[in-house]
Amino acid sequence: MLKAFLGPKIVMVTFLTLMGAFGLNLTAGQFFAPLNDTYGWDLTILSLAVSLNMITWGIFQPVMGKMIDRFGPKPVIAWSAALMGSAFILSATITNLWQFFLYYGVLTAIGFAGCGSMANSVLVSRWYVKNRAKMLSRSSMGMNIGQLILLPLTGALIAGSTFRLAFIFLGVMMLVIVVPLVLIVVKNNPTDVGQMPDGDPLSSFSAVKSVSLSEALRSREFWIATLGFATCGFTLYLVTMHLPNFAVDLGGGKSLGGQLLGIAALGSAASMWITGQLTHVTGKKNLLIILYLVRLLAFIWLAILPGIWQLFVFAAVYGIASMPIIPLVTGIISDKFGRNAMGSILGLSWFIHQLFAALGVFLGGYLRTVTGFYASAFWLGAALLVFGVILTLLMKEHTITANNKKVLQ
């Protein structure tokens, strides 16, 4: 009797892994107030731990990519998730500022680099070819759902008990739920269990040659996709880190920023599902152009029409074009360069994405300090998105036909 195709279970595990990874990594702000109340640590100093986390995460993306190419995604994802969980449990013992920087700024970031979007995208790309974009979108919805569930849960845990118990609960969740699922369910490749990508016994994709990192670096298409992706990183983290403060600037309450990001996450989850269904109809490149344009319009709206109700419109529109860009870019790179070297290639793309993300966070704060307003930062983000649209228009998309042959469009 033929075994059922394991691909859907792989997608389920990657969804849960991304829920935990993104949920944990984005909870840092929830712990600022209790750490300040307990130890008097300044908000600015604590924020530096977030910057360290982002930089460390970016630096370790290519490292984890190399490890995935050598050992496969399964052990890298499992041990990285275990590192994240252990770092959070260790954070429950914090008594000195350097410990927070080490446990969250360094260890959590290293773990996140190995069990976040890049690693799970490589895994899904090994199991799916014809349905890759759809399954990457479904898997990536875990990023949004993790924010929607774990951020308010963390706040409730802190309010109802202590920040130490919240750290322990989140760490144990990764160790008890995510790590065992990865170790028990996941296989590096469909051929490991006698199957083929998409569950298609006639698939010939395993014979398609993968491109090395050095070859990718000489490819025009790699740099077009990666630099376009970098504009996504700049604008994504400019909004994530500065929208709450911008809302306060406009007279909103301190809780308004969280509400706006929640609306954006809901819009992103819905868009993630829809774009996954449309890729076979419109192609990844066309969808990517549409999402960059939608984000561009949202930034222009934010720059010229500042006001509380305008923020709600921005959050809804921006959410549509936030996280769905990630699986589309991943799918385009995978279709172009093959699955076996995806760790190194995608890891480098993510590293550049994170460099621009850190630049977006820094320039957002710097321009706000120098000018007293965020408008110039939002116009800069809009200008970069114009660049992203132009680059994507120049891209040659590689699609996979029914018999898994690569075709230029």
Image (tube, rainbow, N blue to C red):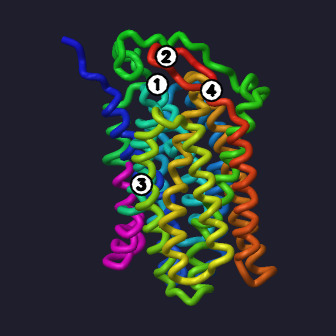
Q: Are marks 2 and 1 in contact (CB under 8 Å)?
A: yes
Q: Are marks 3 and 4 in contact (CB under 8 Å)?
A: no
Find residue 49 and report its horizontal and vertical position in percent.
63, 65
* Above-or-below relation of 329 to 145: above
* Above-or-below relation of 385 to 227: below
Dot 1 or dot 4: first in sequence order is 1
The answer to which quarter of the image holds residue 17 is top left
Considering depth in this image, is 408 or 375 the residue closer to the camera? 408
Amino acid under disc 1: Val
Amino acid under disc 2: Asn
Considering depth in this image, is 388 or 143 the residue closer to the camera? 388
Find residue 239 and report its horizontal and vertical position in percent.
60, 66
Dot 2 or dot 1: first in sequence order is 1
Considering depth in this image, is 158 or 274 the residue closer to the camera? 274
By secondary structure, the bulk of the magenta-drawn segment is best described as helix
Q: Which residue is mark 4?
A: 409
Can you tell which mark lies on residue 404? Answer: 2
Q: Which residues are magenta?
A: 150-174
As measured in the structure, the alpha-carbon distance from the residue carrying label 2 to the one carrying label 4 is: 15 Å
Find residue 67 and report its horizontal and vertical position in percent.
59, 30
Find residue 7 and report its horizontal and vertical position in percent.
35, 28
Classify mark 3: residues with Cα within 10 Å, few (<14), some (14-19) or many (20+): many
